[in-house]
Image (cartoon, grey):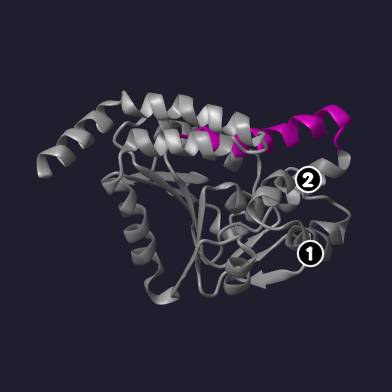
Amino acid sequence: MTDENKVILYETDGAIARITLNRPEKRNALNDALIAGLKDALKHAKADAAVRAIVITGAGSDFCSGADLASLQKISGASVADNVEDARSLMELFILIRQVTVPVVAAVRGRALAGGCGLASACDIVLASATARFGYPEVKIGFVPAMVMAILRTNISEKRAFELLTRGAEISAEEARDFGLVNQVFNEDNFEGEVTAYARGFEKASRSAVALTKTLLYQTDGMPFGDALETGVDVNVIARLTEDCQKGIAQFLKKE
C-alpha cells in the first residue's frame, strides 16, 4: 500500500495510521480513484484494532486543491443521475469519517480548497501548518459547497459559515483557527513532528471510551436536550460495562 504509483498511500506507525493523498503533481486534487482509495484506507484502519488515531495528509506542498479538471469536465457533461451518483460518493466519504470509531485528524500543509477544505472540515480534528490556506471558492464558478454546509453549521457560527461559503476567499491558518475551523496551528519547520506527537496523545486514552465519545457527540447533534441526556444515560451504562472502564476503576481504587 506504499506504492508511489497509488493515489492513496497507507502506513502505520505504532498505533497511528497515516493516509496520504498521493497526487502531488495535481495538488492532490480529488477524483473518483482518490475518493475510492480514501474510503478503502479508512475502512482498513477502522478494522485494525491496534489503530488509535488516523492522520490524513497530502503529498507535496498542498493538502488538497479540490476537484481536478477532469472531474469538473465530467460534471459539466453528466446527466442528473450521474451527478447524483458522483455527489453521493463524496457524501459517503464524509459519513464514513464519522463512522470510523477512532479520531480522524486532518494534517493540513499548503492549500486546502473547495472539496479539499471540505475533506479537512469533515475530519474530527484539523491541525494546520502556519502557512496553510483554507477556502471554499466554489461560488466563483457557480458551484455550491452543499454537503459541507451540514458540517460547517456545527463547526463554526452561522455568520462565519456564510462569509466563508459566499465570498469564496482564502483565509490563513490563524484565521481558520479563529473561525473554529482549525484546532491547532503548528510551525512549518516541525509540522510533521508536532502532528505525530498530537496524534500519539490518543494512545493514552481508552480506545473504547474514545469510540463511545465520538459516536455520542455526533449522534446527539440536533437532538432536543432531554433526548440527548437520555442517549447519554445509555452510553454511560455501556461505558461502565466495558473492559477498559472496569480495569480503569480497579487501577484507580488500587492507587487510593
At 58% from the left and 60% from the top, the residue drawn is: 25
Mark 2 element type: loop
Circle 1 packing at 10 Å, graded few (<14), some (14-19), many (20+), is: few
Residue in front for this viewpoint, 231 or 6: 231
Q: Position of residue 202 (x, y in %)?
A: 33, 48
Residue in front for this viewpoint, 140 or 96: 96
Separation (CA) of disc 1 from disc 2? 14 Å
The reply to whether residue 3 is in sight is: no
Give the label on residue 163, or none. 1
The relative height of residue 55 versus residue 160 in the rendered view (above or below) is above
**83 magenta-colored:** yes
Q: Is residue 20 left or right of residue 115?
A: left
**246 magenta-colored:** no
Q: Quadrant of residue 10?
A: top left
Task: Indicate the quadrant containing the N terminus: top left, top right, bottom left or bottom right.
Answer: top left
Looking at the rendering, the stretch of residues picked out in magenta corresponds to: 78-101
